[in-house]
């Protein structure tokens, strides 16, 4: 006997912010609330992607110092991905 089951799939909330470092010096990129820090060389691009969570995703950017940017993923239950120059960085 074959039995089928109906599965309800919800769409995952997803939002992203892209940034290109057009300065002559590197930037520090910090993703909060995880406090993960990344090094963004001059001319490189990054994208912070927020995935999941129960509500619409929100990413805020804060300038902490002349060479430090903080990306705040303000969505309860969300995870994030950090992409640099088109490659996912763990």
Image: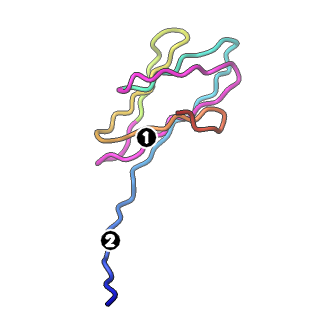
**Which stretch appears magenta?**
33-58
Q: Sort mark 2 into few (<14), some (14-19) or many (20+) by Cα contacts within 10 Å.
A: few
Q: CA distance from mark 1 to mark 2?
A: 25 Å
Q: In the rendering, at what x and y percent does residue 72 appear?
A: 39, 28
Occupied quadrant, residue 86: top right
In the displayed structure, does residue 72 sit left or right of residue 29? left
Is residue 90 placed above or below 15 in the rendered structure?
above
Query: What scheme was used to colour the molecule?
Result: rainbow
Q: Residue at x 58, y 19 (%)?
A: 39
In the rendered image, which quarter contains the N terminus?
Answer: bottom left
Q: In the rendering, at what x and y percent does residue 53 appear?
A: 32, 45
Occupied quadrant, residue 45: top right
Secondary structure under badge 2?
loop
Q: Which residue is mark 2?
A: 7
Q: In the rendering, at what x and y percent does residue 2 appear?
A: 34, 87
In the displayed structure, does residue 31 sit left or right of residue 86? left
Q: Residue at x 43, y 40 (%)?
A: 50
In the displayed structure, does residue 52 sit left or right of residue 45? left
Secondary structure under badge 1?
strand
Mark 1 vs 2, N-terminal side: 2
Numbered marks: total: 2
Is residue 84 placed above or below 8 in the rendered structure?
above
Occupied quadrant, residue 42: top right
Q: In the rendering, at what x and y percent does residue 16 appear?
A: 49, 40
């Amino acid at each position: 006997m074959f039995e089928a089951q109906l599965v309800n799939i919800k769409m995952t909330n997803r939002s992203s912010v892209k940034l290109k470092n057009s300065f002559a010096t590197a930037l520090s990129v910090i993703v909060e609330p995880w406090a993960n820090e990344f090094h963004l060389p001059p001319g490189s691009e990054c994208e912070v992607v927020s995935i999941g969570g129960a509500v619409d995703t929100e990413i805020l950017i804060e300038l902490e110092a002349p060479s430090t940017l903080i990306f705040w993923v303000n969505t309860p239950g969300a995870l994030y991905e950090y992409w640099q120059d088109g490659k996912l960085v763990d």
